Amino acid sequence: VLKRYKRVSGLLVQVTREAINHVLTKDLKHIEAKNVTFHALRHSNASYLLSKGVSIQYVSERLGHSNVGITENVYSHLLKTLRENEEKKITDLMDFQ
């Protein structure tokens, strides 16, 4: 049971998805930003990193996925687009005309 708790300022508190989203919602409202969930921020960050060429192995590790296959499945739509862009680069490089 204690594994679900974290020590914060000397107190043991349970860090839940709901608690994180509550604090996030409050902070986003304070800065007048669009309300999003922590999960959406996590997904956006991973998508951004992959779109900028960060290795899928690193992103998978950062997300805490048990294996890179999970990350590949979740982000397959983005990976397909990245692959198509890489194929276009190669085609352009090989076009000697």
Image: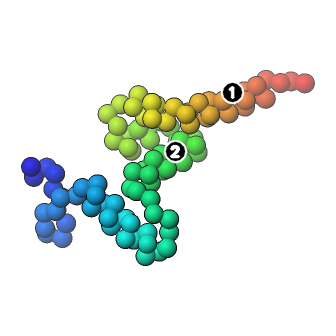
In this view, the mark in front (2 or 1): 2
Residue position for label 2: 47
Mark 2–mark 1 CB contact (< 8 Å): no
Q: Mark 1 is on which residue type? A: Glu
**Residue 75 or residue 21, whichever sits in front:** 21
Task: Name the residue located 47 percent from the left edge and 74 percent from the top edge.
Answer: 31
Left-right relation of 11 to 32: left
Q: Position of residue 2 (x, y in %)?
A: 10, 52
Q: Quadrant of residue 82?
A: top right
Label 2 vs 1, first from the N-terminus: 2
Few, some or many C-alpha atoms within 10 Å of disc 1 (few <14, some 14-19, many ≥20)?
Answer: few
What is the spatial separation of the Cα atoms under label 2 and label 1, in whole angstroms? Answer: 20 Å
Q: Position of residue 76 (x, y in %)?
A: 51, 31
Q: Do we see residue 31 in this rendering?
A: yes
Q: Mark 2 is on which residue type? A: Ser
Q: Position of residue 48 (x, y in %)?
A: 54, 48
Compared with 70, 26 (above or below) is below
Q: Quadrant of residue 87?
A: top right
Task: Name the residue located 38 percent from the left edge and 40 percent from the top edge.
Answer: 61
Q: Quadrant of residue 20?
A: bottom left
Left-right relation of 92 to 51: right
**Residue 31 or residue 3, whichever sits in front:** 31
Q: Quadrant of the C terminus?
A: top right
Residue position for label 1: 87
Left-right relation of 59 to 93: left
Q: What's the image's color scheme?
A: rainbow
Task: Name the residue located 35 percent from the left edge and 31 percent from the top edge.
Answer: 67
Q: Do we see residue 57 in this rendering?
A: no
Few, some or many C-alpha atoms within 10 Å of disc 2 (few <14, some 14-19, many ≥20)?
Answer: some
